[in-house]
Image (spheres, grey):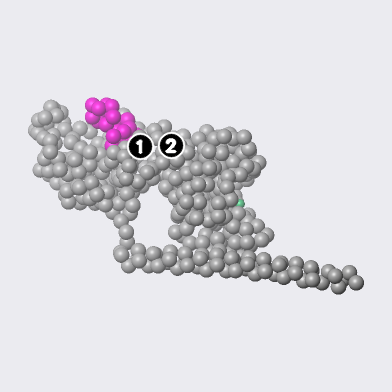
């Protein structure tokens, strides 16, 4: 699978990067932020690779660039925090290679999202010959997410929610650059299809997330409850449960059915009987004993299409487990024209069902926890305000002091001259 985006958390290994007044290390902060960016992009079906995933790892700058060149990445984003000998230096800036118009566009997009999200001082988009910008062959940007040497920004960069907010901003900047920005509440844009959406692989959504999504689309309680079966049975088959569940939502109208298939079929994906038959014939559709059996058959049928290890399977309730179907659809998009006659069948599952499912936020933990977080945010914002006022006062004192010094110099001049 070709990788599209390479994320480069700066420093690592013996190199901590810039270190804050209380000892916070740039290398740790940027690794954490980059991992969050990684997850946000994955959730948007973007393939993404990290140049390092552990604190101990420390590829050289040229190795990082080479990694991106070797896999033919679309774009490269390096994440750093700034450092300065003066602890007053603050704000966010993003770099690109001089004369790279696309790099500049990418840097601008990331910079503006970071400023919107964190409201740190906007130091603007700048150019630099940094090795990772110079040696990468694709549009590249390097974001300096605040000054770790500034006590106020160091304090903020310690907070998990600030890092997540920064990561979301970087991810949004990348999505915008790619023309895939997700505007909340708007109709989903077509997915960025290059490698397709995998049917098999690690789970990318929680069962609670899936249920919240189904409820938000007016699903029946029966359909909401099916999520438990999908998340329970999918790991055995290596099918991503969210993919199967999204397909089931399409096939059953979120459990409302409405076609020849009825809830009594316990058939969550419209599987036909072994001999097949007309779409309008209820008897042509398989009747399962239980929903568990129906979901198992669905997962086995998908795993077969995707060519999962161990398929075709000997023991399966799938009535149409034909060997010739094995590996016919390496990704969800490829189900079009195969699982169902419409060529858009697969991409419709991805765009209209799977993406909104993945974009559904995890249901909030108990109210109390949310309140506590809100208080924490409020407290931090107050702390920021206090620091800002302190800084203003210091600047004012500084001005007064300079003024006084000038006055003394002026008044004493005639006497000094004598
Ligand atoms: Zn750095």
| Residue 351 magenta | no
> Which one is nearer the viewer's eye here, 307 or 416?
416
Q: Report x, y in % for residue 263.
A: 12, 43
What stretch of residues is rendered in magenta? 331-350
Please tell me which of labels 1 and 2 falls first in the chain.
2
User: What residue does disc 1 label?
Assistant: 189
- Where 370 falls versus 208 (above or below)? below
- Residue 22 image position (x, y, % from top left): 59, 66
Q: Quadrant of the C terminus?
A: bottom right
Instruction: Write the residue at 33% across / 52% down.
Output: 361
Ligand 1 closer than 8 Å to label 2 CB = no
Residue denoted by label 2: 179
Q: As displayed, is residue 372 above or below residue 352? A: below
Q: Nearer the viewer, residue 34 or 14?
A: 34
Q: Position of residue 343 (x, y in %)?
A: 28, 27
Confirm whether residue 71 shows in the render.
no
| Image point (67%, 69%), residue name | 400
Q: Secondary structure at mark 2?
A: loop
Assess disc 1: are there few (<14), some (14-19) or many (≥20) residues with their C-alpha within 10 Å of its C-alpha. Answer: some
As drawn, the residue found furthest toward the right would be 418
Contact between labelled residues 2 and 1, with CB atoms less than 8 Å apart: yes
């Amino acid at each position: 699978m070709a990788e599209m985006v390479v994320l480069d958390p700066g420093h690592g290994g013996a190199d901590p990067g810039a270190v804050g007044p209380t000892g916070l290390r740039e290398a740790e902060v940027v690794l954490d932020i980059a991992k969050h960016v990684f997850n946000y992009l994955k959730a948007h079906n973007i393939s993404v690779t990290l140049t390092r995933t552990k604190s101990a790892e420390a590829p050289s700058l040229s190795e990082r660039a080479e990694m991106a060149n070797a896999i033919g990445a679309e774009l490269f984003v390096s994440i750093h925090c700034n450092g300065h000998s003066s602890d007053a230096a603050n704000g966010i800036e993003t770099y690109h290679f001089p004369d790279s118009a696309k790099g500049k566009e990418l840097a601008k997009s990331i910079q503006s999202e970071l400023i919107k999200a964190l409201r740190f001082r906007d130091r603007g988009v700048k150019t630099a010959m940094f090795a990772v910008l110079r040696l990468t062959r694709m549009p590249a940007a390097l974001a300096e997410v605040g000054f770790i040497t500034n006590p106020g920004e160091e304090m903020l960069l310690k907070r998990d929610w600030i890092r997540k907010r920064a990561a979301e901003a970087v991810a949004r900047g990348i999505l915008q650059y790619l023309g895939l920005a997700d505007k909340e509440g708007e109709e989903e844009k077509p997915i960025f299809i290059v490698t397709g959406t995998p049917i098999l692989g690690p789970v990318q959504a929680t069962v609670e997330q899936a249920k919240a999504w189904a409820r938000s689309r007016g699903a029946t309680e029966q359909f909401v409850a099916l999520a438990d079966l999908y998340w329970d049975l999918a790991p055995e088959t290596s099918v991503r449960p969210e993919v199967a569940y999204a397909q089931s939502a399409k096939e059953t109208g979120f459990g409302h059915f409405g076609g020849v298939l009825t809830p009594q079929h316990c058939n969550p994906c419209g599987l036909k009987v072994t001999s097949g038959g007309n779409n309008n014939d209820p008897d042509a559709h398989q009747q399962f004993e239980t929903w568990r059996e129906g979901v198992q058959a669905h997962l086995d049928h998908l795993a077969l299409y995707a060519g999962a290890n161990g398929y075709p399977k000997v023991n399966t309730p799938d009535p149409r487990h034909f060997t010739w179907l094995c590996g016919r659809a390496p990704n969800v998009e490829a189900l079009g024209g195969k699982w169902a006659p419409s060529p858009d069948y697969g991409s419709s599952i991805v765009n209209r069902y799977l993406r909104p499912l993945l974009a559904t936020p995890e249901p909030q933990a108990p109210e109390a926890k949310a309140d506590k977080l809100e208080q924490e945010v409020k407290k931090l914002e107050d702390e920021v305000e206090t620091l800002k006022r302190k800084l203003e006062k210091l600047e004012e004192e500084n001005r007064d002091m300079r003024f006084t010094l000038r006055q003394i110099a002026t008044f004493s001049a005639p006497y000094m001259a004598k």
